[in-house]
Amino acid sequence: MSLSSPQVVSVLKDNFECATRDITGSEYSGVSGKHEVTGKAVRTTNGAGPHNIQMFMLASDGTVLHCLPGYWAPADLVHEVDLAKKLNTVWTSNMSYDQKRREFYRLHLAHAYAHSDATKMRSKMQGFDQKYEAKHRLSTSDTILNPTLAAQILEPGGKAPPGAFKTTDLIMHERMAVRPFLPYNQFDVAAYSDYGRPLYDKNEDYRTASGEVDKDAAKHAPRIGNVDAMKQAKMKGGGVSNASGSGSGSGSGSSRMASYLTRRGVRTFTRMGVRALTN
């Protein structure tokens, strides 16, 4: 998901064929407020809301080239599309399969390390997501660079100092690098998109003229996503836990989508949006 801009619209129009799939109720789905197409929109940080939307970029046979979890700024989204196009060229080349896998790994990490300072600034993990990772996975999370520093966010009024957490752009590319050219129906969406709080909402439609959230109105806003899981967790007296799924499958819905892509020859852009990459 991103904000509309002439550059993004042009890239999508020239390179992709889009469609969407509702992931409501999926094991990896997060929870969010309901937002209409004509509703308000606000900027946020790259990678925010990873459980709520995953933007896939696929080759014509349904092979995953890239996946962007959550929101991405328009300029950064276009930059990631460029990488996907390079990877599509690798995938359709005469290289051996092992060579393709190595190139996939190299290109994803090289792309992350080449990101501009501006991209890295836009990719700072939100404080509540940092707190969730530190509280639940301090010694195991791949989002944490230094557990000792990360633990400071759990102190009253505490904030994570520089060097405590990775930026979301690095997390994304590191996770993608170890998932080289997987078929769409074997991509482990639950594990890949699993960081931070499952509930994410900017309450765009419940903001005052000054930009502040009307908390009373937002409190009664309808929710979408894996709402049943959230209710069950609350009934048990706990919070909503992240899906920690692993393995090779992302569910029957993904299998059906992969089958559709194979039959129709569509190359994908988004999970909530299928988009075709052209050479």
Image (tube, grey):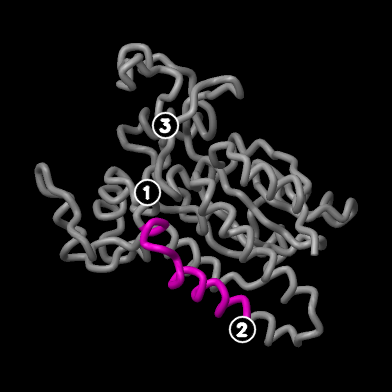
Q: How many marks?
A: 3
Task: Please give the range of residues in magenta.
Answer: 103-120
For the point 54% across and 33% down, the residue is: 225
Which residue is under mark 2?
102
Mark 2 packing: few (<14 Cα in 10 Å), some, or many (20+)? Answer: few
**Residue 215 at what x, y percent from top left?**
30, 17
Could you tell which of marks 2 and 1 lies nearer the N-terminus?
A: 2
- Amino acid type at mark 1: Gly
- Amino acid type at mark 2: Arg
**Residue 79 at what x, y percent from top left?**
56, 59
- Amino acid type at mark 3: Asp
Closer to us: 124 or 223: 124
Which residue is under mark 1?
196
Q: Which mark is residue 201?
A: 3
- The residue at the far right in this view is 263
Image quadrant of residue 147? bottom left
Between the residue at mark 3 and the residue at mark 1, the CA separation in whole angstroms equals: 13 Å
Mark 1 packing: few (<14 Cα in 10 Å), some, or many (20+)? Answer: many
In this rendering, the answer to whether 114 lies above or below 28 is below
Between the residue at mark 2 and the residue at mark 3, the CA separation in whole angstroms equals: 38 Å
